[in-house]
Amino acid sequence: MSEMDAMNFSGLGPLWLSVQLAAVTTVVLLLIGTPLAWWLAQTKTRWKSAIEAAVALPIVLPPTVMGFYLLILLGPYGAIGRWWVELTGSTLTFSFSGLVIASCLYSLPFAVQPLQNAFEAHGRLELEAAWTLGASRLDAFFTVVVPQSARGFLNAIVMAFAHTLGEFGVVLMVGGNIPGETQVISIAIYDQVESMNYASAHRLSAILLVFAFTALFAMYFINRRWQRR
Amino acid sequence: MNAAVDLHYVLRRTEFSLDVDLKIPMEGITGIFGESGSGKTTLLRCIAGLEVPSTGQFSINGDVWQDTPKKISRAIHERQIGYVFQEPRLFAHLNVRRNLEYGWRRRGDADDGVDFDQIVNLLDLEQLIDRTPDELSGGEAQRVAIARALLSAPRLVLMDEPLAALDRARKDEILPFLDRLHTELSLPILYVSHNIDEVCRLCDHLVVLDRGRVLAAGEIQSVLVDLDLPLLGGDEAGSVISGTVEAYDADYDLTRLKFSGGALLVPGRFGDMQSSLRLRIRANDVSLCRDRPNDSSILNIIPVTVDEIQIGQGPYALVRLQVGQDFLMARLTRRSCDDLRLKPGDELLAQIKSVAVRTTAE
């Protein structure tokens, strides 16, 4: 039995893949979500509500709907998928890269909404003071807004990470079930149940349950501590 | 090169418009005085770059910061200003020292010898340096905000009613520090206020704004005695004159101050011999008589010449009196004016009931 098989057997392979996917997705969402949330918090455009609604769509849409559209879009004949094939020679669907793109869209509101709330609560007063003290827009954002929005960032990180870890439908549609490439923990659980392997399903489910509770508990606990301060 | 601030701003909002053309001297404190809604704050925000005017031109000592017809407009952080807002706006996540260092670290290569310890000392912040903003009283927080602005090495300080949010006691706590800025730093300060007492105490020059337009601008002494300025009439009318300490009578605890029109006795001891002081005399505290009263409790009775009389609406008239090179204002009833048959050129005696002395050096 190779090392890889041993990991798959114990369920650690899919778990590790899930953690990698969630970590990459969270980092990408922070990079994209922060400017988007800041823009949404500041903008006076009449399109604001439409854009907010689009960002929030993954909360209400069945994952299969998102997964279906993404499958078309990312597939070798889709707008993005074709371009990706030309660029890299491989397809986006049924690959880890495709999963990252799908997860980023799927978890977008969970990163953007806490950040936007934090930025909107921040106001302009201290920011204006920072500008007059010689800080550029970017400098003031990182030295005044970011430290004072720490709670928003914590919530965004925990929610984006945990939500990506728990996704199932989108991953199944876009990524399928390829061990080591797209078989994340939620898919592996489904797989084990399908093959009547309940002990293994139990073990994996318990890991996910404990993790999800711990992450959310830590987030609420730290939030409460910060609120009291 | 003009050693002055030269500015011109035009800005239109739905309910308000600003159209201001001003030259501001590079030394001392220039008061921007006016009712709320007169555009004082908007003017400061235009200078700082926080407001975008439809036309804006600004230069300081010949350096152009803004000239919209030529498409020049420096970013806010590239204008060397120190802005003190009505609220302290301290950074809540930083302690006092880190707040003070914020602008100081970003002052660039401006080599003007801003000394961190000197400013901390000037505003008496040594005891507060390790506290967080929420551990400061309103007055303390505003002192930190003033120091923070000064430490960013500004070429021009903008103060937007820095005392307006404070109660009487907190104001009295901060005013001496503003006096010290005036004497110890040679920075031009624009000081927005709607409080004539503050303006008279602190400012050397005065700009009067009304509904976005400049009504008057100049040395405070001459602007205050301009009878055509309706805002400065009424209860708050008065004049500011400079004097030097001539003698101190320890027996009665009275200081004798010399000014261009003679000498005045004021209760208490002020300054060193020959030091310059600023005196404010309210029009309500000045009364006139044709002959020297034989017995009067009033200490200061000085000869004056009537310069101009303005009969207002209601029971009062405002009379401008010349004494040497200076002016006094007297607020009399119209009835008294008629009884005394006052006319310009009349030589009379002014009885001055009280004199407010400001230790601000000229």
Image (cartoon, rainbow, N blue to C red):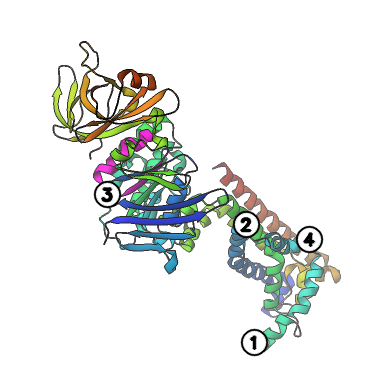
Between residue B43 and residue B184, name the one nearer to us.
B43
Q: Label 1, label 4: how many angstroms apart (C-alpha)?
A: 33 Å
Could you tell whether B140 is left or right of B346 in the image? Answer: right
Q: Badge 4 local density, few (<14 within 10 Å), some, or many (20+)?
A: few
What residue is shown at x 22% (from left), y 13% (from top)?
A: B293
Mark 4 or mark 2: name the one nearer the start of the chain.
4
Disc 2 packing (10 Å; few <14; some 14–19; many ≥20): many
Q: Please name the residue that numbered disc 4 is placed on.
A: A60
Closer to the observer: label 4 or label 2? 2
Kind of residue indicated by mark 3: Glu
Disc 2: host chain: A
Quarter of the image for the C terminus of chain A: give it. Answer: top right
Separation of residues labelled 4 and 2 (CA atoms): 19 Å
In whole angstroms, how far apart are the C-alphas of marks 3 and 2? 45 Å
Q: Are marks 2 and 1 on the same chain?
A: yes
Residue wearing tag 2: A116
Q: Secondary structure at mark 3?
A: loop
Foreground mark, 2 or 1?
Answer: 2
Which residue carries the number 1 mark? A87
